[in-house]
Every structure is written in structure tokens, then in C-alpha cells.
Image (cartoon, rainbow, N blue to C red):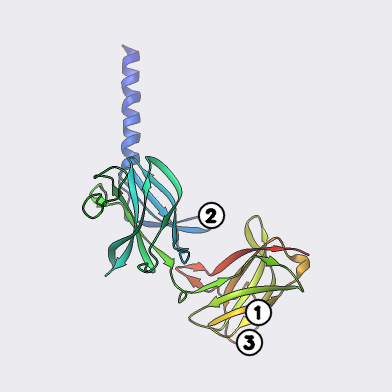
Amino acid sequence: MHKKIFVLIAMLAIFGLFLAACKNTDAPVSNQGDDVVYEQVSTGGFKISVSPQDARDGLIVVARVESPSVSWLAIHKMKDGEPGDVIGYTELETGVSQNVTVEIDMAEATPTMFAIIHADSGALGEFEYPQFDPPIEADGRPVEVSFHAIVEGGDVYVTVNDQELENDTVLVDEIFVFNPPVWVAIFNDEDGQPSEMIGYEFVEDGSIEYIPVEVETEKATPTLYAILYVAQDSLSVFDPDEALTVEVYGEPVMTTFEVTLP
């Protein structure tokens, strides 16, 4: 008898944990983890985590998706502040999926997009929205989250290709900013993070290609970082500890690249 009561109590405890796991959270939030901001929604056993990203290659990478059933992850463009047409989708298996890649139609992409989980309610394995496969609603609201992305050359960015480090110079391929001038600074790597600055250059134009930056080769590491900072003028003294980084969606504008050391 005591054994039956113990089993019953244990089952009720497990059921309570299940209800807590499925409990609806507040509206989509931004969480900070590993220095990356993730836009998240978690409701009814479903969860989406996605970060701001560069989508100019036509791909959206969603960091983590949880779905208790076979479903679809669709990327919607924004229209009038709300989810618009689907511009890309991929099938989701039951359970947790990480780094889910969705190819999108770049001609329709917008700087703000929505990741939405859709049901697979028509022919299984065929995405038939809008006739079938509607957005899933859990706990009374759709499982969706908005996120920002760089989708065209008019966005703010710095690009540096992998290269051989020669003549104490790093070649920055392209910089685009709305409010020049800026400083571009090169940092070495320590434990996967920018560490010591090894060179910098003043950039007066808002759109420029092929910027040579003199660096201290003896301090260089195989992985380097290029980071943009706000500048006043070419006569101002650059101090990365005092200068403000150029930011997009609250994140510093930076890029990582590899070099072959001499």
C-alpha cells in the first residue's frame, strides 16, 4: 500500500514538472549568453532562439528550435510591422534542433524578419501554407519571434577575407557605415574573444574598399578581429578603452578572420 502511494506521489510530481515546463513565458525576450543576444520565444513546449545576423548569403541560421511534433520552421518577411509572406522554410523533426539553416528569397528579405513554427497539417513532408500548415498557436498565441538581419549592402558592416599576413599589414576588404568617420581596429585572439589591439586605421568615407591597416605582426594570432569605432576626426586620439563601438541592433560591428603568420 505504501509503495502504491509513493508511486502515485512520484507520478504527480513528474506531471507537475511537465506542466511547469509547458507553462507559457512572457512575450519574446532578448537573452544574453556567450556574448550573443538571442531573441527567444518559449510557449507550450515550443521554443525558438535566434540571434541578429548577416543574411546577405541568403541563409538564416536559427540557433535552437524545440518542437514536440513534426512541424515546419518558416521565415516570414515583415509587412506593416507584422509577419508577411513566407520567404523560406525547412522541416523540423520532433525534439531539439540546433543551428537550423533556412534558405530565404533575398529579393523579399527585410531587415526585420520573423521565425515562426508551422504545423504539418496537410500532406506530411510538403509545406502547403497558406492552404494548409498554418502557424502553430500554443497557450493562445503563435510560436513566433522577430529578429534583425543584415540583408543588403546598405547595412552597416566590415568585411575582411582570410589572408597571409605580409609587410605588417592587414587588408580590410570593405567598410560601410551611415555616419563616418570611423576607426577600424584589429585585435588578436585569446580564448575565442578579442584581446589586445595590434593596429588601427582612420576611415573617413562611409563606403570604402581595400583599407590597409598596419599591425604589430609579432603580436598577431591566427585568428584576428576587425572592430569599428566611432571617430570624431583624424586628429583625435584613438583609445579603444574610451571610444564607442559602432553598433547594429545593440551589437558591435565586427568580423573574425584568419591569417597565415609569417
Callout in the foreground (3, 1): 1
Q: Is residue 104 left or right of residue 120?
A: right
The kind of residue tagged 2 is: Asp
Q: Give the total of numbered labels.
A: 3
Mark 1 and mark 2 in contact (Cβ < 8 Å)? no
Residue 35: x %, y % from top left: 53, 58
Q: Earlier in the sequence, mark 3 or mark 2?
A: 2
Mark 1 and mark 3 in contact (Cβ < 8 Å)? no
Q: Is residue 203 above or below residue 157?
A: below
Label 1 environment density (alpha carbons within 10 Å; few <14, some 14–19, many ≥20): some
| Quadrant in which the N terminus appears | top left
Residue positioned 35% across, 30% down in the render:
14
- Residue placed most toward the observer, 144 or 175: 175
Quadrant position of residue 185 = bottom right
Q: Dot 2 corresponds to which residue?
A: 34
Distance in Å between CA atoms under marks 2 and 1: 28 Å
The kind of residue tagged 1 is: Glu
Q: Dot 3 corresponds to which residue?
A: 234
Assign a secondary structure to mark 3: loop
The kind of residue tagged 3 is: Ser
Q: Earlier in the sequence, mark 3 or mark 1?
A: 1
Residue 201 marker: 1
| Quadrant in which the C terminus appears | bottom right
Assign a secondary structure to mark 1: strand
Q: Is residue 49 above or below residue 203?
A: above
Assign a secondary structure to mark 2: loop
